[in-house]
Structures are given as structure tokens and as C-alpha cells.
Amino acid sequence: MAGHSQFKNIMHRKGAQDAKRSKIFSKLAREITVAAKLGMPDPAMNPRLRAAILAARAENMPKDNIDRAIKKAAGGEGDNYEEVRYEGYGPSGIAIVVEGLTDNRNRTASEVRSVFTKFGGNLGSTGSVAHMFDRVGVITYKPDVAGADAMLEAAIEAGAEDCVSTDDGHEIATSVDDLGTVRDALEEALGPAESAKLTFKPTVTTAVDEDTARSLLKMIDLLEDNDDVQNVYSNFEVSDEIMEKLSA
């Protein structure tokens, strides 16, 4: 989980930058619109939409923006986006999975491939690196919601598979099928979650040196800067010492 946690911290820092904020809101709105179009525009009846709204709230997206994205979908407005996924290898053979929502598959594939090539990586076929990850549900709560023991007990009672508590907060893991059920049970016991979503968790992580970490972070930064890219996952692990140097 170290690699995943590093990404979470990096994305949090990026989200605090005003220059990135409008782009983040745009991506969140796109996910909300797609979720509402694919299912009911009522979050109570649509788990994916509910998760998208939670993610938007976690980034302090204005309520008006959220409501506008849902109304756009309900009214049949907006572009028709399709879900895409790309898999490949970055510097030093590190596995990378890219998820996106696009209205032009050829454009997105070309732009993602260009980033991989720029950093000495290459795109593979579907399934080429996905076997190095588990598809899991992840629910997060802020640290002040409950103590570690109370959160673990609540997670067990809700049917979760794992619960990790740190100073940054609580992270509860579930199976793909149980995400909605566990989330609902936890929210009944503890209130709304900070986020609840499906993610790719690496089964094995690879430690990298400072130069490789720097290249990988730049590569992921460039991928995330693409309007069509929603999420980027990887299986590399960075030591705290190297992260401090790169964050300085």
C-alpha cells in the first residue's frame, strides 16, 4: 500500500494548487455526468454517482457545480464519454494503469502513448499489467471520525476485508461487489465517508531510486494533466527519505 499512499499524498498536494483546481473540477464533473447518464440521476439509487459526489466534496467542489453536472446528464446534455483504460510500463519497467473518460478514443490513446514514449516507457495490450494489481473498493475517513480500534470494529461489522488507520486517516478495503454495502453500513454507523471508490491496488510493489522516482512522478504528473485521464495507478514504492528530497 506504500505506493498507493504516496500517490494519495501527491494528489492531495496537487489538489491544493489553485492552478490545478479548475482542471480537477472539470474531471470530477465529467465523472458525475457519466455516472448520472449510465444510471439513475439520484445518488441514493446510483452507487457510482454517489461515489463521484463524495469525491467532488472531498475536493471542495461547489454544490452548484455538482448539481449542474447531474442536471446536464438528466437532460441528455453534454458530450457522450466512453470509459477507456491503458496499461503499460514506465521508467525501469514500472507497471502503470491509466483510466480515462473520453469523447475521442483515438486522440486520448495517441496522447497517452506519447507520454509513455517520452519517458522511455511503452503501452501494452489490455491485461498486460493489470494482473499485477487487485481491483478493490477503498473507503476513507478522516482521522478524527473515530479511534483506530473503533474504526476497525466498525469495518469488521460492516463486512470490510481490511482496515488501516494512520495519522492521515482511516482506509477501509472491500471487495468490488461489497463496496456499496460496506460503505452504507459504515455511513450509518459513522456518518458520510470522505471517499468511496474502486481502485487498483498493486499486489507487489517495486522500490525505486531517486532518479527513477523523479521520472515516474513527472510522467504521472503529465498523464494526470490530460483532460481525458481520470486516474493513474502504479506499483512503485518510494522511501520517505527520497520523497522528502523530491518534495523539497
Image: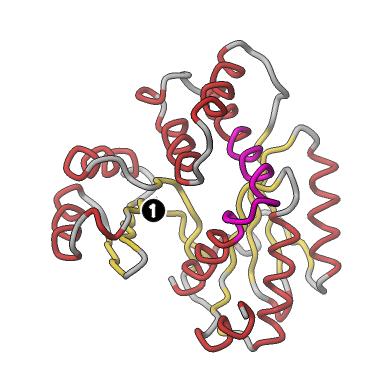
Percent position of residue 128, x then y = 65, 62
Taking 101 as reference, is 194 left or right? Answer: left
Question: Residue 38: horizontal and vertical position, in percent?
Answer: 54, 24
Q: Is residue 24 magenta?
A: yes
| Residue highlighted by disc 1 | 138
The 10 Å Cα crowd at callout 1, few under 14, some 14 to 19, many 20 or more, is many
Identify the colour scheme used: secondary structure
Range shown magenta: 14-29
Q: Is residue 158 above or below residue 65?
A: below
Against 223, residue 234 (above or below) is below
At x 31%, y 60%, the residue is: 170
Q: Residue 115 in the image: x percent, y percent?
A: 81, 61
Q: Quadrant of residue 142?
A: bottom left
Residue at horizontal 85 percent and vertical 66 percent from the top: 117
Which residue is located at x 70 percent, y 25 percent?
A: 80
56 relative position to 118: left or right:
left
| Residue 193 lies in the magenta-colored region | no
Which quadrant would the C terminus be assigned to in this image? Answer: bottom right
* Type of amino acid under label 1: Val
Quarter of the image for the N terminus: give it.
bottom left
Give the SS element for disc 1: strand
Q: Is residue 189 above or below residue 166?
A: above
Extreme residue in the front direction: 18
Would you say the magenta stretch is mainly helix, strand or loop? Answer: helix
From the viewer's perspective, is residue 33 above or below residue 158? above
Residue 168 image-quadrant placement:
bottom left
User: Number of labelled discs?
Assistant: 1
The residue lying at 59 percent from left, 67 percent from top is 234
